[in-house]
Image (cartoon, rainbow, N blue to C red):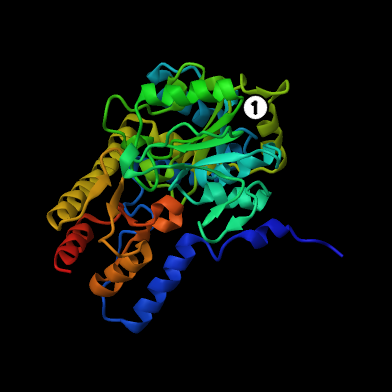
Amino acid sequence: MYEINRNYLKLQGSYLFSNIAKKVAAYKEANPDQEVISLGIGDVTQPLCPAVIEALHKAVDEMAVAETFHGYAPDLGYEFLRSAIREHDYKERGVDIALDEIFISDGAKCDSGNIGEIFSENNRIAVCDPVYPVYVDTNVMAGRTGEYIKASESWSNVIYMPCTKENNFAPELPKETPDIIYLCFPNNPTGSTITKDELQKWVDYANQAGAVIIYDAAYEAYISEDNVPHTIYECDGAKTCAIELRSFSKNAGFTGTRLGFTVVPKELESDGVKLNALWARRHGTKFNGAPYIIQRAGEAVYTNEGQKQTKEQVAYYMNNAKIIIDGLKQAGYTVSGGVNAPYVWLETPQGMSSWDFFDHLLEGASIVGTPGSGFGPSGEGYFRLTAFGSYENTLKAIDRIKNL
């Protein structure tokens, strides 16, 4: 008799955004005449920019001709895209990354879960609290998190690093020593960042402790302050302790076309085994890359026109973030984030839980947001709104909140 992976049975309920979708569907069914505005899930709303669309059309035409047809992509991804990434995302920032340290994939979300396959289940993880739930959920599936403690809504074998108003929503170095540290800056959901000097402390700590940092830089395109690093490899010694996840979803609108990459430096090793070689072997065996057409679209992001157009989209969303922040403050809310990230983190009214506030917004204003408790124990009492809606809907949403 075959056996299932019983770690999946430890997962609590359904995925956060599935729960939200069910609540919204029930509300729409009961209120068919209400216009629901979503400032919840972190999905972009602006269409792919013209430079990307042009590249997609050209690549499709190539696939229709025998001489330019492309089948399976190379294991690491096409060199034309990896070279563009190396030049624009790293070399221009003074960082030397080799082509065979860049692995093209179908998205940072997939890589954040898949990367765990090259680590033993005996590793202990540390996560920011609150943080993107995929980090914890995928480690639950892998058997690293221990048992769920319902009273505290936490896992027995996970080291939580609270991110609270008192520490500006940035974690402090853990008191217990982890094996794998998940860091996400700019952060989802709080929108917080840390300076290069602060990130250097994490790199030094990881090297000293023999830990590896999984660094999620999916929102680096939204950084507006000069002292905030765009990549962990701006820090000295990061190539011996850090893996970086990157995405085309938020900076170029690829949520529906799926494209990302992970950097695994060759200096990174454990017991003489190079993690770059392990990830390359995993990539070659369980291919999760992106097709030729999508990789050509990704290359177009790095052209002069592509850079100009995608930066305009980022500015569009950040203008929405400013509207949300200013409007919430005028309505009397305490807010943070929204400066280096498209997320605004607000305190719920006194005595109201994050799910209570979700219902309050949905039923009172037909607005969808994300309860902070869905991101971890320290997220209770907070709520996330995103700037990924349209400009017009953002204005309407703020007006509705002010009139609640």
Q: Nearer the viewer, residue 177 or 393?
A: 177
345 lies above or below 125: below
24 lies above or below 220: below
Q: Residue furthest right?
A: 1
Query: Dot 1 corresponds to which residue?
Result: 276
Query: Which quadrant holds residue 212?
Result: top right
Could you tell me which residue is drawn at 17 percent across and 58 percent down? 395
Q: Amino acid at mark 1?
A: Asn
Quadrant occupied by the C terminus: bottom left
Query: Which quadrant holds residue 372?
Result: bottom left
- In the visual, does 23 lie left or right of 206? left
Residue 149: horizontal and vertical position, in percent? Answer: 57, 57
Residue 403 in sight here: yes
Could you tell me which residue is drawn at 62 percent across and 48 percent down? 145
Could you tell me which residue is drawn at 53 percent across and 50 percent down? 134
| Crowding near the residue tagged with mark 1, few <14, some 14–19, many ≥20 C-alpha atoms within 10 Å | many
Residue 263 in sight here: no
Q: Nearer the viewer, residue 12 or 63?
A: 12
Residue 37: horizontal and vertical position, in percent? Answer: 28, 65
Residue 303: horizontal and vertical position, in percent? Answer: 37, 30
Q: Nearer the viewer, residue 401 or 28?
A: 401
The secondary element bearing badge 1 is classed as helix
